[in-house]
Image (cartoon, rainbow, N blue to C red):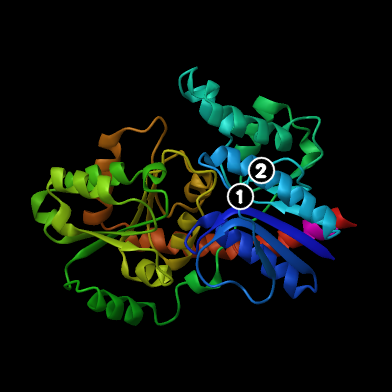
Amino acid sequence: MKLAFTLFKYFPYGGVQRDCLKIARECVRRGHRVELYTLAWEGPRPDDMVVHVIPVPGMLNHRRYERFAVQVAAAARREACDVVVGFNRMPGLDLYFAADPCFARKCRERSVWYGRLPRSRSFLRAEAAVYGPESDTRILLLTDRERDDIRAIYGTPEERFRLLPPGVAPAYLAPPDHAARRLAFRRELGLKENDRLVLMVGSGFRTKGLDRALHAFSSLPPERHRQTVLAILGRDHRRPFLRLAKRLGVANRVRFMGGRDDAEQFMFAADVLIHPAYREAAGMVLLEALAAGLPVLASGACGYADRLRQANCGIVLDEPFRQEELDTALARMLTGDEAEHWRNNGRQYIETHDIFGLAAAAADIIEETAS
């Protein structure tokens, strides 16, 4: 089969970008040809599929996305692709991988004027083209929560949804020599024996709640703060958060590490993963931490929050979010004696739940759709 995959922008450290490549490579492994269409590509291009970078001019992103969708539809017809799989919402998709939260719900939570902005109206039209009851696009979901949000707003028929398992890479599984690797990497980072490492992973610092994490970090008792480092992995504009860290008096203990290809090593070395997101359709990083044996502190807004509660591998905050609860929880996780209990619970959860099968399950559905 010939498959068209479409993605607005590719960069190596985005969650949806990584999932796109996982699924595309699984399809290639099964003998299918993948044509990947995008507006921009950063980093090395895969040699097992064809990447088409479509230059679409324009000053406004939402207008460029509209024109890009038209060009992708034309290219898919010209190349006689059997299935069009989208990783961003746009018209003309056979399958949509729903990695982003429902935009219409976001509009309802904001002011009435937000939904009337030209950008918002464009995004709402694209979303309706995927979720609307008159569409026949099948929707690949990561959580039941997102399906319920979509159905409540759009009335999308139940039969168009397919729930996928998570797609944690096996590299995140804590290895037999976990203790030795943890110690070696901590030394590489310049950490002392009694230092504690709080880790935050994810591009999109504002949405992921980095401001919340910095406030919680600054609230630690002075004696604990002197022995704790906050390491931030991901690609985004760091300047406003550096200013916030300086204003809070914690800049000397905060490290922006940029995008990294060795995030699992940081997880083996860390003591807590903090992820107080404002919005998060799923949050693969939460389950990557679970697999790595790293206790997790997350907001209840994360799609995988229910899985974390089931696993009991850390602390999930209630919604609506309250900063003082995050502050208290972080101090508890750094000073308490529950870490080994949370790690054991995570190991037990992995033994009874599939957290690795996303790519294979998605490829099955793509083949089913084509047939």
Asked if the stretch drawn in magenta spans residue 367, the answer is yes
Residue tagged by mark 2?
67
Residue at which label 1 appears: 56
Residue type beneath disc 2: Arg
Work out whether residue 357 can be spotted. no
In the image, taking residue 100 as reference, residue 258 lies left or right, namely left
Circle 1 Cα neighbour tier, 10 Å, few/some/many (<14 / 14–19 / ≥20) = some
Dot 2 falls on a residue whose secondary structure is helix
Above or below for 29 versus 83: below
Marks 2 and 1 close (CB-CB < 8 Å) = yes
Q: Earlier in the sequence, mark 2 or mark 1?
A: 1
Q: Please determine whether, in this image, residue 118 is positioned above or below residue 163.
A: above
Kindly report the distance in space between the C-alpha atoms of the residues bearing marks 2 and 1. 7 Å
**Callout 2: few (<14), some (14-19), or many (20+) C-alpha neighbours within 10 Å?**
some
Task: Name the spot of residue 254 as percent of width and height, x first.
Answer: 21, 57
In terms of depth relative to the viewer, which is nearer, 160 or 193? 160
Q: Check the image and name the residue furthest to the right.
A: 371
**In the rendered image, which quarter contains the C terminus?**
bottom right
Residue in the image at 86% along x and 56% along y: 370
Residue 287, position as x, y percentages in the image: 50, 58
Where's the N terminus, which quadrant?
Answer: bottom right
* The residue stretch that appears in magenta: 364-368
Check residue 341 for magenta coloring: no
Marks counted in the figure total 2
Residue 179: quarter of image: bottom left
Q: Look at the magenta stretch and give its main secondary structure.
A: helix
Q: Position of residue 209 (x, y in %)?
A: 36, 43
Name the amino acid, label 1.
Val
37 left or right, relative to 195? right
